[in-house]
Image: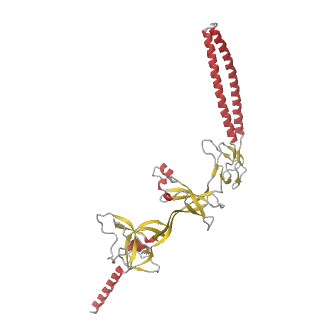
């Protein structure tokens, strides 16, 4: 008899523990829906670059015989940057000049010959009217005049060709001396005195140096395809440069790329190359409005303010989760008349369409109710609620596991101020 009582006592204890485990309230934190100002922003990383910079590449080839600048030196527009050995180009110019003078002399000779044939033509024309010469002599005079005229036109065109060749030779000779096109600083110097450089008029030659105006800088940052639609010229940005700790600089967006940076690689790879696996990024340029000793290539983080809402209803971001609900209108914010029996939010599969819905768990005494909401913009801590909540209503704000998985419609909760510990999966 004693053993039977002991067994009954143990069974009762186990049953009571299981019942309590299943029906004990979930410890949560709550927060009230309140009105705040919400500022939505996008954070992007990139590099500082000058707004205006010119890559200096020669258009003629040769040896650098004069390089009076050094990296970091300030130059003004028109200052000498480098000089290429001009010997070959001087010879080419002299040859072109001689050809031009020879063609001018030939033109003068052809002009004299034309004048002579014109005189002969007019004399024979007079004799022909008086029938003093034969038809053959008259035709020969006409032909001689036409040949002399065509020869004169040909020599005139040769003069034009020689003149153009001389101008080209002079231009190539002038291109052996390169002057600074802008006021700025030698931000990069790639060649040294005595090196040979390659230059052509049809393609980019050797990049000898870069001249940049460091007084006006911009941040060139990359944003994702989800955020680029929010970027507009004129938006304000806060910039943090790694080299200037604990300082923030103000800037404004001046340019937003229309094409992604890896679009060219994707098209060339036919959609199956490495480029197609890269994240889609767009370049955004932010002009820095403050002056500082920035250098090209410095790392920068830009926080761009995209949207702002004043005095809107907000709750902490962790309060909103996604659950599977049947098609139903947004539940209006009102007090529930009575607690309902706990049940899963997702109903049994039916003919109605089941779709993910954003919900919050509204506290009503010792129980919570899942209520669909419509959210707006958000900042780092709070999210705007457009529909589904009223001011001062309490919603579950922690813990994360309870909000995302454990809580059900009508579940019992207990509000605590103590830090919440994550419950291991499978724990009662």
Give percent across and percent down for residue 364. 38, 77
Residue 298's quadrant in the figure? Answer: bottom right
Above or below 288: residue 156 = above
Give percent across and percent down for residue 73. 70, 55
Q: Residue furthest bottom?
A: 2
Give the position of the N terminus as an image quadrant. Answer: bottom left
Above or below 402: residue 86 = above
Residue 398 shows in this picture? no
Residue 308 relative to residue 73: left or right: left
Residue 11's quadrant in the figure? Answer: bottom left
Front one among 1 and 147? 147
Q: How many marks?
A: 0
Give percent across and percent down for residue 50. 62, 55
Residue 214 relative to residue 382: left or right: right
Above or below 96: residue 279 = below
Front one among 266 and 155? 155
Residue 370 shows in this picture? yes
Residue located at (50% from left, 69% from top): 37
Give percent across and percent down for residue 326. 33, 66
> In the rendered view, how is the structure colored?
secondary structure
Front one among 214 and 56? 214
Q: Residue furthest front?
A: 311
Give the position of the C terminus as an image quadrant. Answer: bottom left
């Amino acid at each position: 008899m004693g053993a039977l009582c002991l067994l009954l006592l143990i069974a009762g204890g186990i049953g009571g523990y299981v019942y309590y485990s299943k029906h004990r309230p979930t410890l949560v934190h709550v927060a009230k829906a309140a009105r705040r100002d919400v500022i939505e922003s996008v954070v992007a990383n990139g590099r500082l670059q000058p707004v205006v910079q010119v890559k200096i590449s020669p258009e003629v080839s040769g040896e650098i015989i004069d390089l009076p600048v050094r990296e970091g030196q300030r130059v003004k527009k028109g200052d000498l940057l480098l000089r290429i050995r001009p010997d070959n180009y001087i010879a080419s110019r002299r040859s072109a000049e001689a050809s031009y003078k020879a063609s001018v002399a030939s033109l003068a000779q052809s002009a004299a010959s034309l004048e002579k044939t014109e005189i002969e033509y007019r004399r024979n024309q007079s004799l022909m009217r008086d029938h003093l010469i034969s038809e053959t002599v008259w035709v020969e005079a006409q032909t001689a005049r036409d040949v002399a005229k065509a020869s004169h036109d040909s020599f005139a065109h040769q003069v034009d060709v020689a003149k153009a060749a001389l101008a080209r030779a002079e231009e190539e000779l002038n291109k052996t001396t390169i002057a600074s096109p802008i006021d700025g600083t030698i931000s990069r110097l790639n060649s040294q005195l005595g090196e040979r450089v390659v230059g052509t008029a049809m393609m980019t030659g050797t990049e000898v140096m870069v001249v940049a105006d460091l007084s006006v800088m911009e941040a060139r940052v990359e944003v994702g395809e989800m955020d680029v639609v929010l970027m507009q010229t004129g938006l304000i940005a806060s910039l943090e440069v790694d080299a200037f700790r604990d300082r923030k600089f103000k800037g404004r967006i001046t340019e937003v790329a229309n094409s992604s940076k890896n679009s060219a690689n994707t098209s060339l790879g036919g959609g199956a190359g490495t480029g197609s696996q890269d994240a889609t990024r767009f370049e955004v340029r932010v002009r820095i409005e403050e002056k500082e000793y920035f250098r090209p290539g410095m790392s920068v983080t830009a926080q761009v303010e995209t949207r702002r809402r004043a005095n809107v209803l907000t709750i902490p971001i962790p309060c909103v989760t996604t659950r599977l609900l049947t098609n139903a209108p947004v539940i209006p914010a009102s007090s529930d008349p009575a607690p309902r029996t706990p049940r899963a939010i997702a109903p049994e599969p039916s003919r109605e369409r089941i779709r993910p819905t954003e919900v919050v768990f509204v506290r009503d005494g010792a129980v919570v109710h899942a209520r669909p909401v419509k959210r707006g913009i958000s900042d780092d801590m709070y999210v705007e609620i457009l529909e589904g909540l009223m001011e001062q209503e309490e919603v579950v704000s922690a813990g994360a596991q309870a909000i995302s998985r454990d809580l059900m419609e009508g579940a019992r909760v207990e509000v605590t101020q103590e830090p919440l510990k994550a419950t291991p999966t499978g724990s009662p």
